[in-house]
Image (cartoon, grey):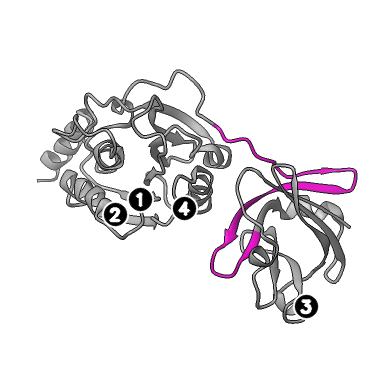
Amino acid sequence: MKYPVLVLVICLWASGVVAQSGALVFQSDFGLKDGAVGAMKGVAYGVSKELDIFDITHEIPAYNIWEAAYRLNQTAPYWPQGTVFVSVVDPGVGSERKSIVLKTKTGHYFVTPDNGTLTLISETLGIEAVREIDERKNRLKNSQQSYTFHGRDVYAYTGARLAAGVIRFDEVGAPLNSDIIRLAYQKPVFTNGTIAGNIDILDIQYGNVWTNIDQQTFARLNAKHGDQLHIRITENGRQVFEGNVIYGATFAAVPEGAPVAYLNSLLNLALGINQGSFAAKHGVGSGEGWKIEVKR
């Protein structure tokens, strides 16, 4: 009895249909106040009832491509090879922007508009290949007259088909004939005693400011706990904050209400206030236009 089953599996694989389903992970800026997310999941479930469907978040600020890029980069490395991510933050829906699937060198797949969403993940996990979605084959049936919900009609449908093994990666569409769209931002660099970096994201619950200055780059300052760091923060060249902040291991390294610089859970430099919000107090935001300079 084992041999016919083995032959069936081999035949399914050869025909492009894999007889198993994997994880499908969604993120969007849709929120959960209406039925948009439910519609995407319904499309995915309609492709295969065997899919395991999860969420990163649906609370990306509206149209915020940078935050979509960050949340993918923050989350995806912890998921196993073969996971398919569908990210829909798409202010250009219905325009000339392309719909793509990127396969990383680690074997993860990302289904998304080509609008900068894959800037960070492409650098972290590497690009093996990118294909443009062929909507003649990979689009929800009878959805051609809809121009404003590609998250449901194209991305959820294609992502589910890929995760369920209904299609192979090479059946998504033709290889992308250009590089992906990338957002410009300040990468961490050490020059003449000063580190320059980007403010990637805010710790939403507490108002902490998270930078992309990694532990190795920060170590070049030779700072020890208790040292003062001189911090300067700008948004598109406009100074928002400048001052001295104690470098500590935890928030308790400073009195209540005082600012502290520390290494966060990603081992990147962050700024906070002991039982307060650094972002709210100083009007600090995040994204590709937000830069930070640190020196002793």
Q: Is residue 203 magenta?
A: yes
The magenta stretch spans which residues?
182-209
Amino acid type, callout 4: Pro
Amino acid type, callout 3: Val
Amino acid type, callout 1: Phe
Q: Quadrant of the C terminus?
A: bottom right
The answer to which of marks 1 and 3 sits earlier in the sequence is 1
> Which mark is nearer the camera, 4 or 3?
4
The residue wearing badge 2 is 53
253 or 5: nearer the viewer: 253
Q: Is residue 292 visible?
A: yes
Q: Is residue 141 left or right of residue 269?
A: left
The residue wearing badge 3 is 254
Q: Residue at x 18, y 34 (%)?
A: 143
The residue wearing badge 1 is 26
52 versus 96 height, above or below: below
- The answer to whether mark 2 and mark 1 are in CB contact below 8 A is yes
The residue wearing badge 4 is 61
